[in-house]
Amino acid sequence: MLLANNRWTILLTILVFLIGMSGFENRLPRLGQLTLVANSLLFLGVVGATDRRTWLRTVMAVPVAVWFVLVVLSEVRPGPQVNVLMVTTGAVLLFGCMIIGFRQLFAPVHAEYERLASGVFSYLLMAVIWGLIYWRIEAVSPGSFNLPDTVGDNTRGVFMYFSMITMTTVGYGEISPAADLPRMLTGLQAVAGTMFVAIFIGRSVSRLA
C-alpha cells in the first residue's frame, strides 16, 4: 500500500538521484552499474504507475522489455551495437516517462501531493532529456557549445546543469551555444520550460479552487 500510494514520490526520488550522480560517474567506482539499476527501476516504476486502462501502458511495456533484454546482453556480450541500442531504447523510454508524468496532471489521483510529485518529475525529466541531447550534439560535433576550460571529461554532468539553468531561464552565461542547432534547441527549451510551469501552476490552482 505504501508503494502504491507514493509511486510518483518514489520515482521522483530515483530521478533526483540519477541527476545528482550524473556528474560523478567517472569518479566513483561501480556508479555506472548503480545508475543502470536506477534507470531500470525508473522505467519499470513508471509503467507500473500508469493507469492500466490506457494504451500508453501497453506501448511503454514493449521498450521496457527490450531495455531489460539489452541490460542482460550488455553483461553477457558487451559491444558497441548493444550500447547504441541501449542509448536509443533509453531515449525512447525517457520521453515516454515524461509524457506519462505530464498526463498525471490531468488524471485522477488519490492525493494531491502525488500530482505535485508527477509534475516535478516531468519537469526534471524534460531537463534531463534536453541535457542528453546537448551532450550528444557536443560529442558528435565538438565546439557546438562554448564550454569553460575546467569541464574536463565530465561533459554529461555539465550539460545536465546547463539544461536546468536554460529551462529555468537563469542563464549564468558560463556555457553558451556556439552553433545554429543548439541555439534553436536552447530557445525551444526555455519556451517549453516556461509553458510547463504555467500549465503546472494553473492546473494546481484550478484543483484547489
Image (tube, helix red, strand yellow):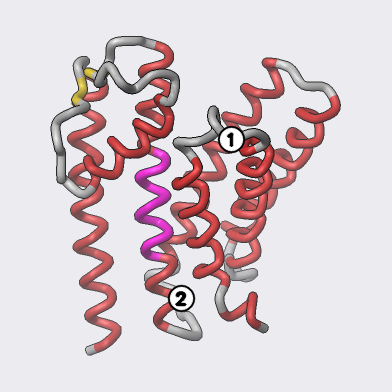
In the rendered structure, which segment of residues is drawn in magenta?
119-129
Residue 76 left/right relative to 60:
right
Secondary structure state at the residue bearing disc 2: helix
Q: Residue 114's spot in the image, x, y percent?
A: 46, 76
**Viewer can see residue 116:** yes
| Label 2: few (<14), some (14–19) or many (≥20) C-alpha neighbours in 10 Å | some
Image: 207 above or below 129: below
Residue 64 — which label?
A: none
In the picture of the structure, the residue carrying the numbered disc 2 is 114
Q: Residue at x 45, y 52 (%)?
A: 98
Q: Residue at x 28, y 76 (%)?
A: 204
Q: Residue at x 16, y 45 (%)?
A: 169
Q: Place residue 207 in its image quadrant.
A: bottom left
Image: 177 above or below 44: above
Q: Main secondary structure of the magenta part?
A: helix
| Label 1: few (<14), some (14–19) or many (≥20) C-alpha neighbours in 10 Å | few
Q: Quadrant of the C terminus?
A: bottom left
Q: Residue at x 14, y 37 (%)?
A: 172
In the picture of the structure, the residue carrying the numbered disc 1 is 28
Residue 81 left/right relative to 201:
right
Image: 123 above or below 39: below
**Mark toward the start of the polypeptide (2 vs 1):** 1
- Farthest-out residue, right: 76
Q: Amino acid at mark 1?
A: Leu
Secondary structure state at the residue bearing disc 1: loop
Q: Residue 144's spot in the image, x, y percent?
A: 27, 15
